[in-house]
Amino acid sequence: MSPRTAQTSAPVIESLAERWSPRAFDLSHELPEGALRGLLEAARWAPSANNTQPWRFIVARRGGESFARIVDTLVGFNQVWAVNAGALIVNLAETTDAGGNALPWAEYDLGQAVAHFSVQATAEGFHVHQLGGFDRDGVRAAFDLEDRLVPVSISAVGKIGSADDLPEVLRERELAPRTRLDLESLVLVRD
Ligand SMILES: Cc1cc2nc3c(=O)[nH]c(=O)nc-3n(C[C@H](O)[C@H](O)[C@H](O)COP(=O)(O)O)c2cc1C
């Protein structure tokens, strides 16, 4: 248990309770090649509509050329902290299949795959912080993506660092209490 552990109204599995999105990543920790294999494998086994598996990933470890290209697409507020992550993963939805048929659940399915990735990350001692603040067209151009591949989010992954190393405004957010709507307000009908 840490001060960031979810305060749940019923027990949940540890990897869910301990998952949260830090901005302080440990710059001294380098991800060895293959370190994210289990996380990607967890994503691979997510459910999807008609088993279409419409998720694709660009995996870029810190120090590499792809990582720098992704950092260039981040809005300034995200760039400040995400540049210290061990890796940045672009989460892509494949919105049509190779034959041009629409995959209407693609973004929904991608979200489930990213959730699997995040929970597996927690179980393996990593943290993930997803972000939507980036230039989608910039990512498209940087990786010469086909139109049917939509960059939906980016996941910053790595070992957690110290909040003391963050700029003041981010440090405050890092330490602020975590909040959620009450379960009662989420369940609209319960028979
Ligand atoms: C699709 C998506 C987009 C997000 N975009 C950003 C972002 O651009 N910048 C950021 O700092 N956090 C971003 N977040 C993180 C959320 O703010 C965070 O998950 C939420 O506040 C709940 O906190 P927790 O993950 O620690 O429980 C995003 C999360 C998701 C799922």
Image: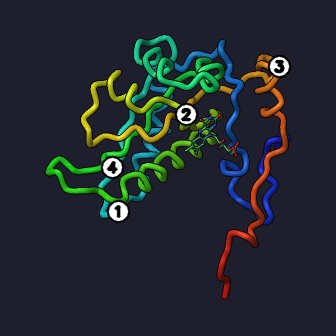
Mark 4: which amino acid? Pro
| Image-quadrant location for residue 3 | top right
Say the numbered circle drawn on residue 54: 4
The residue identified by callout 2 is 133
Within 8 Å: ligand 1 and the Cβ of disc 1? no
Q: Earlier in the sequence, mark 3 or mark 1?
A: 1
Which is in the foreground here, disc 2 or disc 1? 2
Tell me: residue 3, above or below residue 52: above
Q: How is the image coloured?
A: rainbow
| SS state under label 2 | loop
The residue identified by callout 1 is 49
- Residue drawn 49% across and 31% down? 36
Which is in the foreground here, disc 4 or disc 2? 2
Taking the image in four quarters, ligand 1 sits in the one at top right
- Tell which residue pokes out farthest to the bottom in this image: 191
- Residue drawn 49% across and 45% down? 114
* Alpha carbon separation for disc pair 3 and 1: 43 Å
Look at the numbered discs 4 and 2 and tell me whether their residues touch, using CB distance below 8 Å: no
Within 8 Å: ligand 1 and the Cβ of disc 2? yes
Q: Earlier in the sequence, mark 2 or mark 1?
A: 1
| SS state under label 3 | helix
Say the numbered circle drawn on residue 164: 3
Tell me: residue 129, above or below residue 96: above
Q: Earlier in the sequence, mark 3 or mark 2?
A: 2
| SS state under label 4 | loop
- Residue drawn 76% across and 27% down? 170
